[in-house]
Image (cartoon, coloured by chain):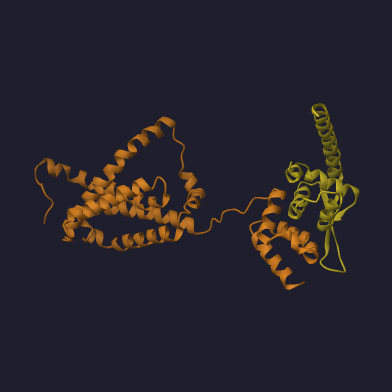
Amino acid sequence: MRTDTRDYLTELRAALADLPDAEVEAIVEDVAPQLADDPGRLGTPAEYAAEVRAAAGLPSRAPRQGLAPRVALWVLAITTVAAGYAGYLNERIASNDGRYSLPVFGLALVATWFVVARFGPDVARVAALPETRLLDVKAPAPVVRYLASLQPGWSLLRAALVGVGVLLLCHTIGWYPGGPEVVALAVAAIVLLAGHRSRTDRRWLWLSVPAGAWAVGVACRLLGYLPLIVAGDIGYVHR
Amino acid sequence: MEISQLLKGVLDLAVLAVLGKEDGYGYDVVRRLRQAGLDEVGDASVYGTLRRLYNQGALTSYVVPSEEGPHRKYYGLNDAGRERLAESAATWRGFAATMTDLLGASA
């Protein structure tokens, strides 16, 4: 067998690799005599593979599921849980309660960055995962409409709660770079932007969903303070 | 009118007709279709059609060693294939007659 023939068949096998072995071998066997005699008419291995698939009624190349979308989904889930917990701990994050969770938050941030940078806009593959589709519960239309009507309000509330959380955190750890209020406003603005952008570019979900969890955590913490505030015991969180 | 568009609908029938005359391997079927006048037929489309007809149970296949190069996998019609050829041929003749009538009336 000539080298270019062998190369062609190797590439053809690669282009058909998702099909059952017997079918791949049958396709290769069929084309081999023509390849030895008149390879010019066949096009590139990829073109040939695509045309054979179409005519044979075989599935076109399945999108590679692979590990990456699954890792991305788990990173989102873990980051969201960690962010919710961090929001609840908030100013106690540097205490004994929270200290040991700091590496988890750090890892979650790095993993999120990795997913967003490495994955590009290809997050459609995450939506195609079976476990994602499991989550995609079909709610009745009125419920969906009602939730959608809450969306803008929730976006604002989320940004505000995240801002408050940042404020609390800055005060606690004694970090005053240009005033905690400025930092809190900036973070709140980023969260607002992330929520808006995530509607068209799903990568922003990796920021907006954990931010939402953090906001819920902060809200729970504030609710815990409510009786104290009502009783007039605290007016300003300060140590 | 694009011949290639028309071919899509009748390639199954064309391949069945070629194999109805005599068994053939893929490249052989391609050449016989061309000799019959179907110059525009795509090579990969013919090979793909052979695979689909085979997977649908209309064809048998057997391997014949070749002295010149790689062995050749021949395809031939089985009973289901012959039945399908007869049905498809009847459909085509009816369709062609209708079209001929239609064109004759409008010309």
The part of the image, by quadrant, that contains residue B90 is: top right
Q: Is residue A162 left or right of residue A118?
A: left
Q: Can residue B8 be seen in this view?
A: yes
Q: Quick one: which chain is orange? A: A
**Residue at figure coordinates x 21%, y 49% from the top left:** A164
From the image, which quarter does the C terminus of chain A lie in?
bottom left
Q: Is residue A213 left or right of residue A124?
A: left
The part of the image, by quadrant, that contains residue B105 is: top right
**Residue at figure coordinates x 30%, y 41% from the top left:** A154
The part of the image, by quadrant, that contains residue A11 is: bottom right
From the image, which quarter does the N terminus of chain A lie in?
bottom right
Q: Is residue A213 visible?
A: no
Q: Which of A10 and A78 is in front in this view?
A: A10
Instruction: Locate residue A137, reporting x and y percent.
Output: 46, 39
Instruction: Locate residue B1, reporting x and y percent.
Output: 74, 41
Q: Quick one: which chain is yellow? A: B
**Residue at figure coordinates x 42%, y 49% from the top left:** A202
Q: In this view, does B52 lie to the left or right of A213?
A: right
Instruction: Locate residue B65, reporting x and y percent.
Output: 86, 65
Outermost residue to the top: B105
Outermost residue to the front: B107
Q: In this view, does A9 lie to the left or right of B70?
A: left
Instruction: Locate residue A91, reporting x and y percent.
Output: 20, 55
